[in-house]
Image: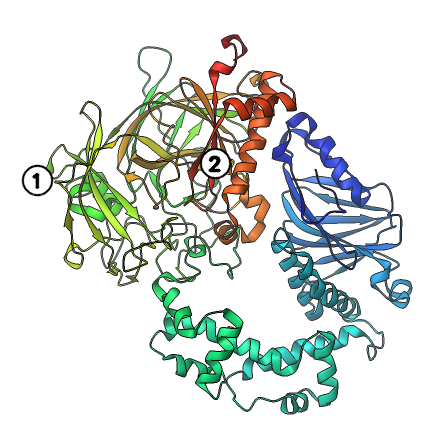
């Protein structure tokens, strides 16, 4: 429960059973004098609040559509400010309706009659500002009515950027971080209120902030100038040196210290940027405005607690400190939800196969994996389905591993469909987009889709009559390795394991080189008793040039052909290692409700890259339906996987599975284990496995920065908390136990394990034994 008087407090609707979510949410927004009205069945919301030292309350909301109505004014006079980050909002004050676009700022006295409405998902920052933060003049003369500050005005744009930064970092901001935020926020708001107005600005502190901002921009452009000084900057700005000194003093800074910090920060960026890899440390120091390399080294060590040489050595360019974030969108890239490809939403299912009905109740479908029936590295509600099935139908589905080109000879050659999917020459590749990034690879230049998402998925499969609020069950009847078609290895099966740069182990290696990627090729013996996999050989990844001529220093783009002439293979066939098989699909997911393309790597509420080996033969996974037709996709097949998937992958092996698809309509979900289900649930013969993540719905909780932020913010602690809350809900909703009983049962009978620490949104699963309850109860 969120309490606006405490530091870093949070609310997530997924933590509460559906019948009580609305009541709990209303108790949250009552802290701001609001009451909420929502669509009960579709309500989804997360929120976080922090109180600054100046008494400013910052309140972030990520929510589905809802109306917020002001029912009680605050106890003391205050302002209410709303920054819209994503979506749309209408603010109705008395008889006037003001519409916000992303980046706009709504501001009004907190005492005015107000309703805030959204008909779609939105992300916003609400800010309650006490009167004490402003002068009486501003309150009386400027803020008697509601206003919208448009983002196209200069001062408003800066204010909006500051608030958007607070919105994105609210979870991690510490008490001390709010001191500069308080100071600059108030000044920027004053400047924004005066933007375009007729007031005399000569004495307004907002002007001081604007001058300081221009000064800092001027300094940034002149950092390489070793003669940079306060007098010249003051002359360029048309102010006195003393006035400029006072501006920095107001920011609790000095001119010389600020310039030194910026030069050191820029030098740190250059030291790890591949573009400057050939520059010596001395050359970098001169390029950043230092006169003396020795002085630079001393200052650098004082700021970063390490020498420039060690800083560069510990963050080599091929594996820079930002590499983990670059498995998703880089943190400085703002994601366009609409995506450049602009896929068209299909309400009908043109081209969907009409199955031939066999004797019996259900049809059987065969879904090959070809370049026409797979999508690579992303989910989307906009993809046209390749087949349409009815509830109860059986589907034999082929899936290919994205790592097959680690050994083309054993996993692709002579296999017509695999060759079709992986076809790539200097002129063309069959499946061009690989990932949710831009089609023109304008972010990092890796290739279409940028590899922001890596799994090959077969589908999607549309399910007749599936609607949001339903639950889709996918039963895995059988799963088996895809045999090699190469006459040299005919009938045998192979897989690949990559210990890669996104692995948990990567920065803690003992032997040199300290940061390396290693690929191990396994042979699969699925007919043995018991079935097992045996390592054949391994090699260390070396830079590979793809057929389009792009160099890949690391395993950063899926399906790059490995030229075995460039790697040294080490024979492992004599090693007495037998890995037990755990064949399963790493990815089973339905389309998310959000627009645009969604990276296939982080799992979420819609399933996706669960990477849990318990989802194998004889199991089922239950997934909440979010869009018409459900749009089910299956892929990322594994022959074996350990809990945590520590090094980066399992044994990635193309597989064929027999699945049954069963639709559970929302008006028939009043039975265990399906009551109140809004997250992935795996069922095995003797247990239920509940998937917890660092963020239950990272897309909604992290907003437009989610594709990069999820790779930076995940933790086992957060995933454990989500797993705990889901199990509590599961037990209370399905088995009529109290909260205290649920916690006791969890402590004495439920096993929690680490699903994976490599997929962006880290996972902790909870294994609930069915033996806890009478069979009559489920």
The answer to whether 52 is drawn above or below residue 754 in the figure is below
Do callouts 2 and 1 mark residues in contact (Cβ within 8 Å)? no
> From this viewpoint, is residue 272 visible?
no
Which element type, helix, strand or loop, lies under badge 1? helix
Q: Position of residue 663 (x, y in %)?
A: 47, 21
Q: Which of 599/517 is in front?
A: 517
Q: For marks 2 and 1, give the one nearer the viewer.
A: 2
Where is residue 582, by image quadrant? top left
Q: Residue at x 62, y 59 (%)?
A: 165
Q: Which of 641/439 is in front?
A: 641
Dot 2 crowding, Cα within 10 Å, few <14, some 14–19, many 20+: many
> Which residue is disc 1 drawn over?
488
Q: Position of residue 408 (x, y in %)?
A: 18, 47
Which element type, helix, strand or loop, lies under badge 2? strand
Label 2, label 1: how far apart the Cα atoms are: 42 Å
Q: Position of residue 338 (x, y in %)?
A: 52, 51
Numbered label attached to residue 764: 2
């Amino acid at each position: 429960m969120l309490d606006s008087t405490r530091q870093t407090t949070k609310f997530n609707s997924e933590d509460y059973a559906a019948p009580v979510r609305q009541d709990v949410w209303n108790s949250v927004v009552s802290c701001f004098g609001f009451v909420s009205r929502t669509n009960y069945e579709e309500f989804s919301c997360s929120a976080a609040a922090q109180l600054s030292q100046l008494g400013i309350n910052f309140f972030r909301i990520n929510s589905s559509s809802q109306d917020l109505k002001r029912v009680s004014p605050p106890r003391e006079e205050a302002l209410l400010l709303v920054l819209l980050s994503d979506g749309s909002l209408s603010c109705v004050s008395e008889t006037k309706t003001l519409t916000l676009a992303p980046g706009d700022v709504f501001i009004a006295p907190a005492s005015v009659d107000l309703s805030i409405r959204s008909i779609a998902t939105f992300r916003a920052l609400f800010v309650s500002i006490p009167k004490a933060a402003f002068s009486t003049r501003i309150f009386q003369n400027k803020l008697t009515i509601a206003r919208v500050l448009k983002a196209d005005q200069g001062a408003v744009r800066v204010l909006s950027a500051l608030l958007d930064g607070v919105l994105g970092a609210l979870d991690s901001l510490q008490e001390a971080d709010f001191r500069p935020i308080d100071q600059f926020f108030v000044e920027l708001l004053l400047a924004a209120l005066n933007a375009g107005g007729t007031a005399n600005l000569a004495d307004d502190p907002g002007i001081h902030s604007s001058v300081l901002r221009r000064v800092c921009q001027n300094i940034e452009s002149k950092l390489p100038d070793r003669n940079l000084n306060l007098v010249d900057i003051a002359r360029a700005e048309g102010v006195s040196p003393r006035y400029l000194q006072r501006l920095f003093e107001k920011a609790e800074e000095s001119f010389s210290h600020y310039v030194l910090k910026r030069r050191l920060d820029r030098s740190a960026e250059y030291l790890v940027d591949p573009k400057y890899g050939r520059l010596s440390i001395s050359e970098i120091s001169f390029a950043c405005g230092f006169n003396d390399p020795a002085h630079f080294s001393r200052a650098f060590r004082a700021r970063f607690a390490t020498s420039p040489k060690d800083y560069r050595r510990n963050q080599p360019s091929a594996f820079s400190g930002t590499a983990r974030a670059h498995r998703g969108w880089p943190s400085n890239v703002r994601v366009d939800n609409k995506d450049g490809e602009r896929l068209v939403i299909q309400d009908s299912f043109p081209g969907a196969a009409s199955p031939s009905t066999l004797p019996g109740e259900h049809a059987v479908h065969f879904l090959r994996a070809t370049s026409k029936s797979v999508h690579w590295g992303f989910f989307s509600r906009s993809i046209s389905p390749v087949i349409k099935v009815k509830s109860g139908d059986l589907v034999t589905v082929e899936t290919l591993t994205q790592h097959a080109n680690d050994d083309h000879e054993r996993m692709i050659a002579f296999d017509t469909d695999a060759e079709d999917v992986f076809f790539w020459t200097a002129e063309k590749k069959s499946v061009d987009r690989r990932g949710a990034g831009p089609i023109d690879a304008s972010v990092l230049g890796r290739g279409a889709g940028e590899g922001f998402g890596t799994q090959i998925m077969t589908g999607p499969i549309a399910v007749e009559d599936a609607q949001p609020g339903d639950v889709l069950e996918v039963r895995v009847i059988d799963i088996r390795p895809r045999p090699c078609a190469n006459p040299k290895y005919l009938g045998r099966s192979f897989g690949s394991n990559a210990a890669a740069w996104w692995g948990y182990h990567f920065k803690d290696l003992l032997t040199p080189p300290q940061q390396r990627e290693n690929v191990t090729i396994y042979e699969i013996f699925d007919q043995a008793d018991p079935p097992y996999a045996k390592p054949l050989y391994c090699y260390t990844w070396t830079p590979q040039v793809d057929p389009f001529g792009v160099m890949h220093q690391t395993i950063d783009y899926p399906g790059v052909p490995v030229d075995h002439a460039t790697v040294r293979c080490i024979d492992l066939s004599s090693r007495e290692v037998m890995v037990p098989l755990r064949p399963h699909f790493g990815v089973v997911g339905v389309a998310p409700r959000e627009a645009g393309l969604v990276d296939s790597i982080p799992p979420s509420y819609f399933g996706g890259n669960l990477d849990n080996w318990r989802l194998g033969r004889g199991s089922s996974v239950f997934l909440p339906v979010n869009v018409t037709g459900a749009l089910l996709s299956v892929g990322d097949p594994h022959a074996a996987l350990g809990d945590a998937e520590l090094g980066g992958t399992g044994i990635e092996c193309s597989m064929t599975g027999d699945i049954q698809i069963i639709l559970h309509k929302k008006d028939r979900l009043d039975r265990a284990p399906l009551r109140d289900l809004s997250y992935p649930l795996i069922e095995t013969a003797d247990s239920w496995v509940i998937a917890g993540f660092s963020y239950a719905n990272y897309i909604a909780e992290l907003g437009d920065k989610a594709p990069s932020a999820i790779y930076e913010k995940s933790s086992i602690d957060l995933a454990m908390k989500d797993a705990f809350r889901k199990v509590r809900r599961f037990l209370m909703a399905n088995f009529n136990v109290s909260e205290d009983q649920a916690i006791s049962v969890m402590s004495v009978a439920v096993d929690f394990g680490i699903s994976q620490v490599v997929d962006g949104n880290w996972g902790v699963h909870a294994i609930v034994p069915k033996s806890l309850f009478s069979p009559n109860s489920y």
